[in-house]
Image (cartoon, rainbow, N blue to C red):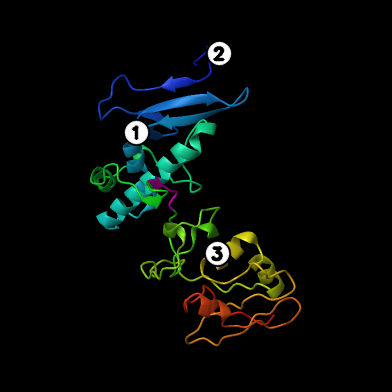
């Protein structure tokens, strides 16, 4: 530090007291709590912000939501974000120097610099609130999933990552709240039938299909797979396996309770 060198496992930077207007800074951002500088090799270190979870959430919400959004949206994400953070603290943080990253890989975190009156209010009015699921007679925290746009349907969590087949993560609900998003509809995407069939045979896709009632346990590659399409004002086209055989097109839709899929149309190519 300065012109001097010191050998240490880590360096801790903190304020002289815990007054609300005290903070520490790094890379032009201010943070509540403490900063731990942890060596990673001879010429590098990582910076970890040790902070109260409620203060952490106040720096997350403004980075994940638009300023104009309603306070109830902020309060909802305060509950989901708190659950997400606690789940990682209890399950993954013990093997690392930190519990969560500060990017979209976890939850975007901007520290004290990102806080707004709305984010502070949302956190303060949901003190300690979390999401739980009843398992083996106990209320258990799980890892909630959220995204900026669902495309009209709530996806099963396993679409994003390995996730247990518990009720809160099954997805399948119709949701029109994100229709204003520029990402609500994708531009045209072309995928060959062979590529699509290969993807549908992946274990994670088979698990999703199992959740909605389609039996994939006896569907080896080269036999048949359900067609995907959207019913309504669109012409329905059958997909085919690489061998060229057309499968029963209505199976998946009928066994999933008539739910629409995320595809408007499939080509025959």
Q: Residues within 10 Å of mark 3 (few under 14, many from 20)?
A: many
* Disc 3/disc 2 C-alpha distance (Å): 52 Å
Estimate how packed mark 2 is, as few (under 14), some (14 to 19) or many (20 or more) residues with alpha carbons within 10 Å. few
What mark, if any, has residue 175 been given in the picture? none
SS type, badge 1: loop
Toward the front, the furthest residue is 137
Residue 224 image offset from top left, x and y in percent = 69, 76
Circle 3 SS class: helix
Residue at x 37% of width, y 33% of height: 30
Residue 24: name its quadrant: top left
What's drawn in magenta, residue-wise?
Answer: 139-144
Query: Which x, y percent locates residue 118?
Result: 26, 48
Please check the rendered image and state whether residue 89 is part of the magenta-colored stretch, yes or no.
no
Spatial distance from mark 3 to mark 1, Cα to Cα? 37 Å
State the residue position of label 1: 52
Q: Which residue is label 3 attached to?
A: 208
Q: Residue 245: where, in percent of width, then height?
A: 72, 82
Q: Disc 2 designates what residue?
A: 7
| Secondary element type, mark 2 | loop
């Amino acid at each position: 530090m300065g012109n001097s060198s010191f050998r240490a496992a880590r360096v801790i930077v903190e304020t002289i007291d815990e007054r609300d207007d005290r903070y520490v800074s790094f890379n032009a951002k201010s943070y509540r709590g403490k900063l731990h500088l942890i060596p990673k090799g001879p010429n590098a270190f990582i910076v970890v912000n040790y902070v109260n979870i409620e203060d952490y959430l106040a720096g997350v919400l403004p980075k994940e939501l638009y300023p104009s959004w309603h306070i109830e949206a902020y309060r909802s994400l305060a509950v989901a974000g708190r659950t997400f953070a606690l789940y990682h603290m209890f399950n993954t943080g013990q093997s690392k120097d930190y519990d969560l990253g500060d990017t979209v890989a976890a939850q975007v975190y901007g520290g004290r610099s990102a806080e707004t009156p709305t984010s502070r209010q949302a956190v303060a009015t949901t003190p300690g609130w979390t999401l739980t699921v009843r398992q083996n007679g106990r209320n258990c925290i799980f890892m909630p999933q959220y995204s900026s746009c669902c495309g009209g349907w709530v996806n099963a969590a396993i679409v994003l990552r390995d996730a247990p087949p518990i009720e809160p993560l099954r997805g399948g609900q119709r949701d029109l709240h994100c229709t204003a998003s520029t990402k609500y509809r994708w531009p045209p995407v072309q995928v060959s039938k062979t590529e699509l069939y290969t993807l549908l045979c992946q274990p994670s896709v088979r698990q999703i299909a199992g959740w909605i009632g389609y039996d994939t346990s006896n569907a080896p590659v080269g036999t048949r797979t359900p067609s995907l399409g959207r019913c309504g004002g669109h012409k329905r086209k059958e997909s085919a396996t690489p061998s060229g055989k057309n499968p029963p097109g209505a199976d998946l839709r009928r066994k999933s309770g008539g739910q629409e899929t995320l595809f408007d149309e499939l080509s025959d190519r």
